[in-house]
Image (cartoon, rainbow, N blue to C red):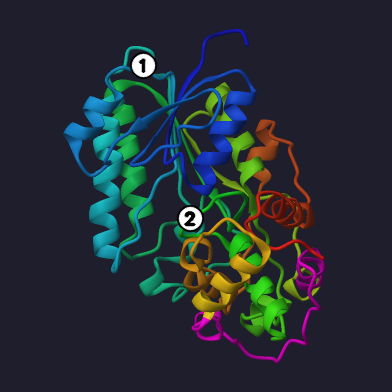
Amino acid sequence: MTQERRALVVGVTGIQGNALANHLIGDGWEVAGVSRRPPTDVSGLTPIAADLMDPSSVADATAGFDPTHVFFTAWSRQATEAENVKVNSAMIRNLLSAVSQSPGLQHVALVTGLKHYLGPFEAYALIKPDTPFREDQERLPYENFYYDQEDILWEFAADTGFTWSVHRPHTVIGWAIGNAMNMGVTLAVYAAICRETGRPFVFPGSPEQYNAVTDVTDSRILASHLEWASTTPAAANEAFNIVNGDQFRWRRMWEVVADGLGVDAADYPGQPTPLEEQMADAAPIWDGIVDKYGLVPNPVETLASWWHSDADLGRTIETFTDMTKSRLLGFTDYQPTNRSFLDLFDRLRAEKVIPPLS
C-alpha cells in the first residue's frame, strides 16, 4: 500500500463486519474490531470490547486506536421503529463522538440497506417504489433509523471534515454465526431439518418473490465495495447500492440451493408457508441432528433467523437495485449469486455447522 491504513470495523462479529475485517486484513490494513464480545482468534485483528449504547464505554475502548477509516456495520433490532431510531441513532452518535476527533481520521462508511427504499418493517412497502432502486430516490415519509443514521453521519462529517460513504446492500449472504439477518445459514438449517425429517423443502415465500426478479449481496463483494469507496476520491460523499451484479428468480435459484444442500426442491404450493410456522418444533430436531452428526453445538435460534427470511421471501413486490452509480465511478466487481450460496454451504459443512452431504 502507498500509505498506512488503520480500519475500525464496528460490528465485527456480524455478517458484514466479519467479512470486511478479514478482507481488509488480507489487503494489509491494520484492523481493530468493535463489538460487545469481539473475536479474539482472528489473526491480524485487534479486538475492542465496547457497549455502543454507553458513551463512556465507547470512548474508553477506542481511546488507544487512531483510525484512518471507520466502517459502521452494527445495528440492534428493536420492537418498533421509534425504538430502532432511538437505539441505532445513539449507537452511531456515540461511536462518532468518540472517534471523530482522531487526528488520522479520513473516512467513515455506514452500511444500511434496502429498507431505505422499502420502509421500516411496520410500514414495509406500503408505498411501492419502482424498480430498480436508485440512490437518488426520495426518502419515504416514515420514521426510519437508516435516515437518522445518515443525518448523524453527515452532521459529524460537516463538523470535522472527514469524507463519508453510505452502502445499501440487499439481503447479505455470507459467513456469520448468531446473526439476526442471515438467510444463507437459515436456509441451510431448514434444509437439514427437512432432509432429516422427510419434510418437503418448499420455497416458503410469496408468489411474487418466487417469480419476480431479485438480487442479493455477497458479504465478500460488500467488503470490496466498502474498501473501494473509502479509498477512491471520486466515490467520496456518496450513497451507493451494492449487490452482486446479477439478477435471478427464486423459482430457478431454489433448485440451486436445494442441490447445494442435498435435498430435493419441492413443488411450490402457490402461497407462502412461513418458516416461523414450519419450524416451530425445530429446536429438539436440530439438537438431535447436532448429536447425530457431531456438529458444533449451536442452538437452532443462534443459527436460523426464521422471521427475517420470512420477511425477505414473503415480500409481495419486486425488489432489485441499480448499480450504475458505482460502475460509472469505477467499481466493476461482480459475484455470481449461485456461488454466494454454494460457497457458504461448503464452509458451513467444513466448519461442522451443518451436516455433510452424505
Q: Residue at x 61, y 18 (%)?
A: 28
Q: Nearer the viewer, mark 2 or mark 1?
A: 2
Magenta span contains residue 262: yes
Q: Which of disc 1 and disc 2 is earlier in sequence?
A: 1
Q: Is residue 228 visible?
A: no
Q: Residue at x 55, y 59 (%)?
A: 182
- Dot 1 amino acid type: Asp
Q: Quadrant of the N terminus?
A: top right
- Spot occupied by residue 186 in the image (x, y as percentages of width and height): 59, 66
Circle 1 sits on which residue? 66
> 320 or 37: which is nearer to us?
37
> 286 or 175: which is nearer to us?
286
Figure check: 230 above or below 248:
above
The span shown in magenta is 254-281
**Callout 1 crowding tier (Cα within 10 Å): few <14, some 14–19, many ≥20:** some
Q: Residue at x 52, y 10 (%)?
A: 4
How many marks can you see?
A: 2
User: For the residues marked 2 and 1, what is the alpha-carbon distance in whole angstroms?
Assistant: 28 Å
> 327 or 23: which is nearer to us?
23
Circle 2 sits on which residue? 179
Q: Quadrant of the C terminus?
A: bottom right
The residue sitting at the left extreme is 56
- Spot occupied by residue 243 in the image (x, y as percentages of width and height): 65, 50
Q: Residue at x 64, y 25 (%)?
A: 26
